[in-house]
Image (cartoon, coloured by chain):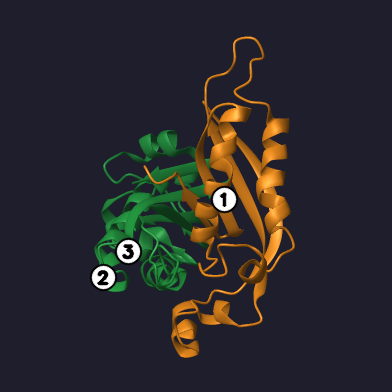
Amino acid sequence: MLVTKRIEFSASHVCRNPMLSDRENEELFGAAANPHGHGHNYVIDVTVEGDPDPVTGMVLDLKKLKEVVNREVVQTYDHRFLNYEVPPFDHVVPTVENIAIDIWHRLEPHISQVGGQLQGIRVYETDDLYVDYFGEAA
Amino acid sequence: MIRVTRKYQFSASHRLHAPGLSASENAELYGKCNNPHGHGHNYQIEVSARGPVDQRSGRALDPRALDRLVKEQVLDPFDQRNLNASSTIFEELVPTTENLAREIYRRLGVNWQSVFPSAWPVLEKVRIAETPRNIFEVS
């Protein structure tokens, strides 16, 4: 069974690869390469897979999952300029793809303590653009 | 691998009427959707593609390239149109959202290489909501 917890945070970023020239970055990312950055209200769906416990009837304690997500992700990302304040985005372009992969790595080691195993991370950058990441194996 | 999904919408009218059936059979099968003057929907479509993250761009897909393809193959031909009259395919096929989903998936697949010439990303699925309560997915 899959259980999904949704959380939100707001952050700014600039889509810029420091190894490329200004012109190359503009070609690659368009307006998103504006050096002053811009922001999004990110929406994250954390999906955990497992069987309901026969006693509690729950796959996991959603309160505990929320605590882990807040501690490992929201406190780090919320109201930050990702390129300057949240490693690895000092050297990895903070595209929505790379944000999903980073969130997976931050959460994955902690999920087994909560219950179940991490199945997928969905990150909405805007209402009309989102990505799913299911780990290296998928 | 990452799956990237982009949402679009368009508005169009259609009439469900199977040419192989009689008028009364059509009326019984499709009900209000068989109204000879047609009716319309705000179609919400989601296009999903899958691929590895490119090291240079940090992206699995350039949304601007997908936008160009969807505009050319879906929005320009279908938005603010009557589906029955918008494409020769719906002269033969009833423009149900099943057939529309399949046609959109086909159009994107056939023209995919014009905007994504490399091995990745690949088209994974098309999901269409005819209304918020009727949703169709093809992959």
Question: Would you say residue A3 is visible in this rendering?
Answer: no
The front one of A34 and A125 is A34
Chain depicted in green: B
At x 50% / y 88%, what residue is drawn?
Answer: A22
At x 47% / y 66%, what residue is drawn?
Answer: B79
Cα distance between the residues tagged 3 and 2? 26 Å
Amino acid tagged 1: Ile
The front one of A111 and B40 is A111
User: Dot 3 falls on which chain?
Assistant: B
| Residue pointed to by mark 1 | A103
The answer to whether the residues at label 3 and label 1 have Cβ atoms under 8 Å apart is: no
Location of residue A32 in the rendering, given as x and y in whole percent from the top left corner: 56, 77
Q: Residues within 10 Å of mark 2 (few under 14, many from 20)?
A: few
A101 over A48 or under it: above or below: below
- Asked if labels 3 and 1 share a chain, the reply is no
| Residue pointed to by mark 3 | B87
Q: Secondary structure at mark 2?
A: loop
Q: Secondary structure at mark 3?
A: loop
At x 30% / y 39%, what residue is drawn?
Answer: B21
